[in-house]
Image (spheres, helix red, strand yellow):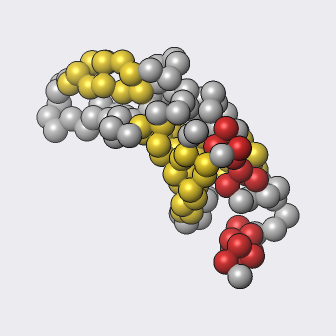
Amino acid sequence: MADFQIIVGDEDGDTYSFEVDGQDANRFIGRSIGETVDGGAVGLTGYEVEITGGSDTAGRPMHGEISGAGTKKILSTGGVGFEPTVDGERKRITVRGAEISEETRQINAKIATRGDTSVEELLDDGAE
């Protein structure tokens, strides 16, 4: 069964980390970068989160332009997975496709739709 670490970013710069497994993790499998998921999967009832990226167990980043969930070698001039140090530098890197699978370990997301309750109130209720 899949288990993920989900990092959710807020528009004010705050980030929240959640460990998700079981049925909640199954809500993410098969989804791609740019799709929205019900926030109840990470404890944010009434919210929707948008998937913005992620990585697998080996640390390979997800790339939005690669279809499927497998890995692929691409020639990169910069962006996801490679930061050039001089102008014109290129490098062949291995990236994972845009679809979430059981090999994915970290999922990056942002809040797409807000609920009636603030995030702090939802998270404080779980701590008590």
Residue closest to the far left: 86
Quadrant occupied by the C terminus: bottom right
Residue ID at (56%, 56%): 19
Q: Quadrant of the N terminus?
A: top right
Asked if 126 appears above or below 32 in the picture, the reply is: below
Q: How many marks?
A: 0
Q: Looking at the image, is 52 positioned above or below residue 72?
A: below
Quarter of the view holding residue 51: top right
Residue at 54% from the left image edge and 30% from the top image edge: 101
Quadrant of the rendered image containing residue 79: top left
Along the line of sight, the residue nearer the viewer: 23 or 15: 23
Instruction: Using residue 57 as the reference point, say whether residue 84 is left or right of it.
Output: left
Does the image show residue 33?
A: yes
Q: Residue furthest bottom?
A: 128
Which residue reaches farthest front?
A: 1
Depth order, front residue of 75/97: 97
Query: Is residue 110 something that shows in the picture?
Result: no
| Residue 81 location (% of width, % of height) | 32, 35
Vertical position of residue 14 compared to residue 50: above or below: below
- Nearer to the camera, 66 or 23: 23
Relative horizontal placement of residue 70, taking residue 31 as reference (left or right): left
Provide residue 73's location: percent of width, then percent of height. Answer: 30, 18
46 or 86: nearer the eye? 46
Query: Where residue 115 sits in the image (x, y, percent)?
Result: 81, 59
| 42, above or below 57, in the image | below
Residue for point 67% across, 55% down = 42
Q: Could you tell whether 76 is left or right of 26 in the image?
A: left
Q: Residue at x 26, y 25 (%)?
A: 93
